[in-house]
Amino acid sequence: MPKGKLLNKNSTIGIISPASPSPKILIDKFISDFRNLGFKIKLGNCLYEENNYLTGSDKDRAKEIMDMFEDQSIDGIVSFRGGFGSIRTLPYLDINKIKRNPKFFCGFSDLTVLLNYFSNNGLITFHGPMIKSNFNEIITKTYFERILTSPSKGLIYDILGYNECNRCFSGYIKGGNLAMICSTLGTPYEPNFDNSILILEEINEPPYCIDRLLTQLILSNKLNKCNGIILGHFTDCIDEKIDSNSLITMIKKRLSSLNLPIVSALPFGHDYPNVTIPIGAYAHYDNKSNKLVICENVLR
């Protein structure tokens, strides 16, 4: 399996914008903040573009991704933000060229489709903060820098909530944003959940929409060989009748027909902390310690 290389403070990170645009003043501010981490940076060609609710055209945004992978001066790639549009770049990407040029590739939310598509094709990717994220949050920053710069075998993630899970489980980490996963079902780009640990998070979807998305995932029969599910942040997904605790209970109940172990409160997604998790890496959840452990080095 091709793996990108570990980074250091002399490494260059390419910044891409495969989804929604942002005002220039905001882009410049967050790039300035990101520079404080010490990495060199190179900006993608679509970063300052605006095409209605997208940055550049679909082909231009795909070219931006391809250029970053093929540019030998770039050591890692991080998206500026998510939003909408990454899925539209998929038909224009050359996955064989990407596999020949493996690199640290990080994002979340709308980037879920890219993370899992690349992972399905053998490249470990990273569900984690983007340039627009708050790197002043210490746990978010710590996991991002740790996984970028140090061997990851044995890296431990503490589950922050109590879980009544009575089973350990292992598998290849897949998933991310629930809506984006569902958007790829029935397409050539849908994730392969066989022998997997599925991680799920969401934002701004009311409980009935969460129920509908989970139902679509269940009815797709794609989780028949999944080994376990871990829930992250479900940010602003409550209403006047269902609070955050009730929402997690509802999610677990809706997924109960799968007869899979389900764990909640791994801190990833649209809230903080937002830890960096390697998509495609083999991991193990231990129900006694309530921890997720990475079982391999994800960068070389």
Image (spheres, grey):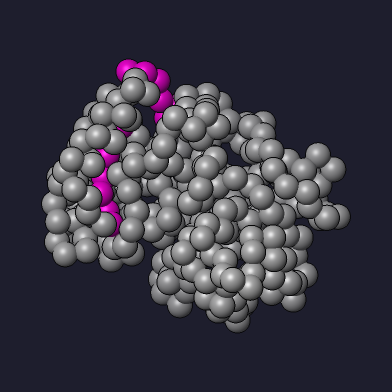
300 vs 264, nearest the viewer: 264
Q: Residue at x 18, y 48 (%)?
A: 23
Does the segment drawn in magenta span residue 194? no
Q: Residue at x 21, y 61 (%)?
A: 54
Instruction: Place residue 113 in its image quadrant.
Output: bottom left
* Residue 209: % across, % down: 52, 75
Instruction: Place residue 157 in its image quadrant.
Output: top right
Is residue 35 visible in the rendered image? The answer is yes
Describe residue 51's horizontal placement relative to residue 88 as left or right: left
Q: Residue at x 16, y 43 (%)?
A: 24
Vertical placement of residue 252 versus 28, above or below: below
Give the main secondary structure, helix, strand or loop, of the magenta stretch.
loop
Question: Residue placed farthest to the top in the image?
Answer: 10
Is residue 86 visible in the rendered image? The answer is no
- State which region is magenta: 5-19
Q: Residue at x 43, y 51 (%)?
A: 108
Vertical placement of residue 165 versus 156, above or below: below
Vertical placement of residue 244 versus 288, above or below: below
Describe residue 236's horizontal placement relative to residue 295 as left or right: left
262 vs 283, nearest the viewer: 262
